[in-house]
Image (tube, rainbow, N blue to C red):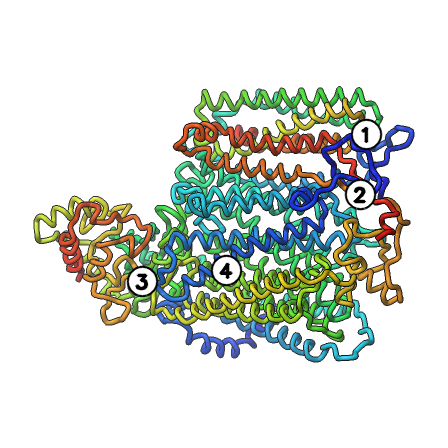
Amino acid sequence: MAHAAQSLQPSQPLQPGHSAKRHTGLMDWITTVDHKKIAILYLWAGGLFFGIGGLEAILIRIQLIKPMNTFLDAQTFNELITMHGTTMIFLGVMPVIFALMNAVIPLQIGARDVAFPFLNSLGFWTFLFGGLLLNLSWVMGGAPDAGWTAYTPLSSTGYSPSHGVDFYTIGLQIAGLGTLIGGINFLATIITMRAPGMSFMRMPMFAWATFITSAIILFAFPAVTVGLVLLTFDRILDANFFNVAGGGNPVLWQHIFWIFGHPEVYILILPAFGIISEVIPTFSRKRLFGYSSMVFATILIAFLGFMVWAHHMFTTGLGPVANALFSVSTMLIAVPTGIKIFNWLFTMWGGQVRFTTPNLFAAGFIPTFTMGGVTGVMLASAPADFQFHDTYFVVAHFHYVIVGGLVLGLFAGLHYWWPKMFGRMLSESLGKWTFWTFIIGFHLTFFVQHFLGLMGMQRRVFTYLPNQQFDTLNLVSTVGAFLMGVGMIIFLVNVFLTSRRPADAPEDPWEDGRTLEWTIPSPPPEYNFKQTPLVRGLDAFWKEKMAGHKAMTPAEPIGPIHMPSATILPFLMSVGIFIAGLGFMFSRDEFSSSIMSFLFNNYIVTALGLLITFGSMLMRSLFDDHGWHIEPEELEGR
Amino acid sequence: MMKTWQAGKRLLPMTAALGLLLAGCGREDLSVLRPQGPVAESSYGLMKLSITIMIVVLLIVFSIAAYVWIRFRRKKDQDEIPKQVEGSFKLEVLWTVIPLILVIVLAIPTVKVVFAAGNDHSDDKDAIKVKVTGHQYWWEFEYTDYGITTAQDLIIPTGKHIAFELSTKDVLHSFWVPSLAGKMDTNPDGTVNRFSFSAPNEGVYRGKCAELCGPSHGFMEFKVKSVSGEAFDKWVASMKAPESVMPEDPVLAEKFKSQCLTCHAIGSMPASPVAPSLTGIGSRESVAGILLNDDTREDGAPVLENLKTWLHDPQSVKPGNKMPNPKDMGLSDEEIDGIAEYLAGYTLE
Amino acid sequence: MTTAHAEAADGTLPHEPEKATLEGRNKVLAFWLFLGGEAVLFGTLFATFLALRNQTNEGPSAAELFHLPLVAAATFLLLVSSLTSVFAIQAMHRGNVAQLRNWLVVTVLLGLAFLILEIYEFSVYIRHEEFGMTTSAFSSAFYTLVGFHGAHVAFGILWISVLIGQLAHKGLTVVTAPKIYVSAMYWHFIDVVWVFIFTVVYLLGKVG
């Protein structure tokens, strides 16, 4: 096992077999560094936040069901839209993406784990504690209310005096740290841990998508880190970055936010492209059409994604030269995206398409995402965007891309890899029910919103006046949202029922698996591959199947496998950051108790949190982890 | 380049048909799809062109998808392995080049209109110059050439270019009259925006704030009233030499002066930076931008009733607005009604 | 893959011990990637500073504030510390643990001297020039950019100090070598960032 994990017991000698210290129950989950278990943690946590974000969406749609509705008050509504957007993007879909990456990538590239199992665990826990911190705002004085974009000066203390936006800046900062760590980890994993024979151009498309996505994370997240630091300093230390009275400039925030924010859109959608590129070939029994152009298109999208941010700011007033340039660069993204769509269609052409649940979602993805894509091109035209911008047309567009694109892709991926993750096949019939209710609900909800926008309904309004011809379309939209909710519930029922069935999924449950993850048991043993496989081409497993082999050719003899030790340090480090964040956030508050005031106002709580984090870091550096071994006898004994 | 233009021209009949279809959508005074002025018209033209291109793209994708789903569905007992096609250079070039051409067809008129829209008429002697200032949650309109300031109702003469200078006194807002033009943000000093539009026909158009600005963002509406040149001149004259009528009852007048005019301005008083001018409020299209003064419509009410609704509890009409509740300022219900009656009668001719 | 932890049986280290194991190579690679992210981080801070550097809000301007000889001295200290860090890695490649330790100690001391100068500089600004975080957009941008760099230096000092301790305790092994190597990468990176700060913040501030 190549790895970098270390433990608290430097003097512990290497022991044969499973006698290394192992935890069970809750401690096992808190201390695990196994990428498969971390995947499940990501899935649970992401699912939890996705559920919260979904409930927020339902509340929003109930409020908008009719004009002048009083179901929610204006302030609560603004908190809900802010938290819905922030939660869904940073805490809902990103962890589910990371869940699939963690579950699948090491298997697909024939590795026994990621490059840095310890960092993998750290990335998860910082994400989770960041997300928890953000959601604590609901019970600690009010959620952020300035929109997920937190435009200044609305998000500054002058206009948002509660701690809501502080929860936003600090929570996202901590969660973003986790994402950045995950990104670096997957980059390193894919560069160095591929099985012998797996050149870059033999990697499965999902591995490529993960690779490029991680690169975007690496170059985009530091920008929002800085943006959030500046906003935090403005709010807590009275700095003047966005404060006009002190010489600051609110438009600067928009630039920093969108320099991160637009690449973020591709961080979300590229993994979905990767999933679709796995599911469609499997269920067409045909290799991916135009593999090299798919790789090229992915890289091009990532590259262009960094130079289009100002299309979110056409109405900010950047002048005609900037508007023209960003219009054209944005439109250009349609070209590589189009390549992908046609490649998927022609993968099915001449194949034998089987409409299993994952492939249904993939099939639904293509037209739905294309609709989101074409409205994107329409939005790119700056003078037309002057009309579209900040209306329900934009809301429709990005939900077509993120829900119709990414979430359908995630559903495809979850149904597809569920047997590999849990050893149990999800029910096909319930899966199909999920698909139909969800996709019909989705189109009902969002298709009509295009027209609402064009008819003059701006976004982020807590209610609307009657007699604007908005009423029927809003009603339809709300009904659709409920149908999507039904789809989600069916999925949860499916998950629950499946969990009570025996784990009997075979190694290659879809029978037409093409890539390495289908060559090992479902779920895989903790070391993944007894022997590292030798890769002879793209779609390594399919190639062996076509050559009449039942299994991969091993690239090494059976030998002891070195495993990293479980450790609680990543969890402690994240707890420390969480405490430090809360301490900093309340450092300027007056408390009724003088002890509390003393602890917070002198940054003692912050220092304590940082001490836990850096202390854990020091422990990790001082005491080497020698790990433990799984011996060949044990491997054979299975 | 010429060729792509030709391709664009060929789309025209479809564009026209689409225009007819979309024109059924929304109110004339509000919908982007029913433009009432040249600026909205040019945005709409680009929209029609882009929607047409995009519908063509969608039709192609949907047709191929439907075909492969039906034609290449796996049959029962189908066991032979399909041919593993690596790709096709020709096809892949085809679907790189065609989208590129479509993008160029859309990009050229886009760039043209972008630069045309940059024409803000701020140096145009014939244009009416209006300084728009966004406030939480009301709009201030200052006619710099005439030295008059009003709120909520933007009165403009038909056919003239109106050159706007947009800024905000607090958070960001966005100035949007969908049927006349696209939106433009109101930024703080230092990043002031300029643009212009014109309305060829008389009418009242709905305007909205399109940038989240706080709880009552959705209620930060205003009206654009385009009137004939003479009517506009008359309005300007009456605004320039307004009578500072006060309530007839001297006690009420004193209350009004001490409680309301500390923030609001009427008549020849200098414009206030914190609250809308009340000059001629009885003639406006709405109270607070959203209570429509039109009792012929089911969603409207007489101006007096609207003023009473507003003055008795401003927070319930527009949550989070900055106007203190008159009751908290020591005004009785009768005094509030009295002021409402006075304001309803304060009209301009 | 079991060789990941193996050390040469005779106790000698390979020429580049930091790259002797997959673990070490991963560490070096990931650290390059991390520095890529750090570059974006400082790039954004620089962009912010450039956008706001003339917004002095009636507070002191860069030209009035900066005292170049002091900053030049700090720059000299940091540049030399980068050089001593190179010497340390060369000593490591020769397998000379004593020299490696000595050069690391010199590096830390130079870093410490730089940090003391910077703290002194900030305290002069705050106490005598009334130039604090809240003075102007320029001051906020200045303290954030230069302060972020200073925090990086402080972290580097602590980090390398811990590694000096580990070196004494565990000796030079294929486990400690990659740590020392990446800490040197880090040290060079913050040195390069400082060169940009010296140019963009101080020289440009004095000239413009």
Q: Amino acid at mark 3?
A: Val
Label 4 vs label 1, nearer the camera: 1
Taking B89 as reference, is C52 above or below it?
Answer: above
Q: Are marks 2 and 3 on the same chain?
A: no
Work out how far the residue at label 4 is from the one at label 1, CA to CA, in angstroms: 59 Å
Secondary structure type for disc 3: strand
Instruction: Say yes or no: labels 3 and 1 on the same chain.
Output: no
> In the image, is B319 to the left or to the right of B24?
left
Mark 1 residue type: Thr
- Give the residue pinned by disc 3: B224
Q: Are marks 4 and 3 on the same chain?
A: no
Q: Residue at x 23, y 45 (%)?
A: B263
The alpha-carbon separation of the residues under discs 3 and 1 comes to 77 Å
Residue denoted by label 2: A18
Vertical side of C96 occupied by B125: above or below? below
Circle 1 sits on which residue?
C173
Q: Residues within 10 Å of mark 4 (few under 14, many from 20)?
A: many
Q: Chain of mark 3?
A: B
Amino acid of disc 2: His
Number of the label disc, if any, that sits on residue A382 = 4
Q: Nearer the viewer, mark 2 or mark 3?
A: 2
Residue B200's x, y, as percent?
34, 68
- The residue under the point 42% across, 73% down is B25
